Amino acid sequence: MYTIRLAVEAIKANIPCNNINCEHSYEYVVLSNNKGFKRIRPCAIKWRPFAMMDKHRPTKAALMPIIHSTILCWFHIMQTFKNHFRTQKIDLSLRYPIALAFKIIGRCRSIVEAKKMAIEYKNFIYSLPISTEAKTFFIRDLEENWLSKEWVLSFIDDRRLPS
Ligand SMILES: [Zn+2]
């Protein structure tokens, strides 16, 4: 978990500033634990990027204190979603519409908007010719795994655009 933090911190400490007259000099400083040294650039800019990641709690915990925010990777999200189609035995013809409805929630720009869209999603899921278990599963999956307090801001588009 801390490997990823060390890697990002090493990059952060070495990004040259924007001053064209600066020589962007660097130096090596001894680590406080005496276990080696690190390279830093005194002119390094304050960089707080968004980081795209898989849904992995330790990664998020390592990154959050040193970056702006995390974004869940949609390839990873859809991979998970695809597995649900298989386990819930969803007919091929229904998979794309369900995935699209799910994706629309992901594109919402605020939690309020996402919650409103989630109601539409719920109605849509209930209207489908799938088993009651599958309906319950997809609605619960959205609420518990994607719109949960922990992940909602990494799932939807909120706060990603420059204000
Ligand atoms: Zn510089």
Image: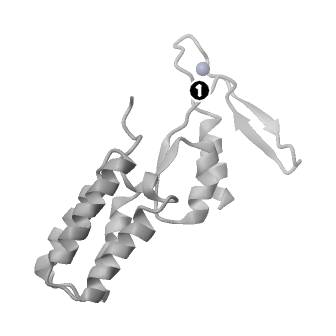
Count residues near mark 1 (Cα–Cα under 10 Å), then give few for <14, some for 14-19, many for 20+.
some
Name the quarter showing ligand 1.
top right
Viewer-proximal residue among 11 and 47: 47
Q: Residue tagged by mark 1?
A: 45
Is residue 95 visible to us here? yes
Looking at the rendered structure, the kind of residue marked 1 is Ile
Q: Is residue 88 among the parts visible in the rendering? A: no
Name which residue lies at 50% across and 58% down: 149
Q: Nearer the viewer, residue 7 or 80?
A: 80
Q: Position of residue 96 (x, y in %)?
A: 16, 71
From the viewer's perspective, is residue 15 above or below residue 103?
above
Q: Quadrant of residue 127?
A: bottom left
Please tell me whether residue 49 is drawn above or below residue 6 in the rendered image. Answer: above
Q: What residue is drawn where x is 22% and y is 89%? A: 131
SS at mark 1? loop
Q: On the rendered image, what quadrant is the C terminus found in?
A: top left
Give me the residue at 83% from left, 43% from top.
Answer: 31
* Residue appearing at x 20%, y 76% in the figure: 126
Q: Which x, y percent locates residue 84? A: 32, 80
41 left or right of 142 in image: right
Q: Nearer the viewer, residue 43 or 84?
A: 84
Which quadrant holds residue 100?
A: bottom left
Quadrant housing residue 90: bottom left
Is residue 93 positioned above or below 4 on the image? below
Q: Residue 67 at what x, y percent from top left?
A: 57, 43
Name the side, left or right, on which 39 lies relative to 16. right
**Label 1 CB sits under 8 Å from any ligand 1 atom:** no
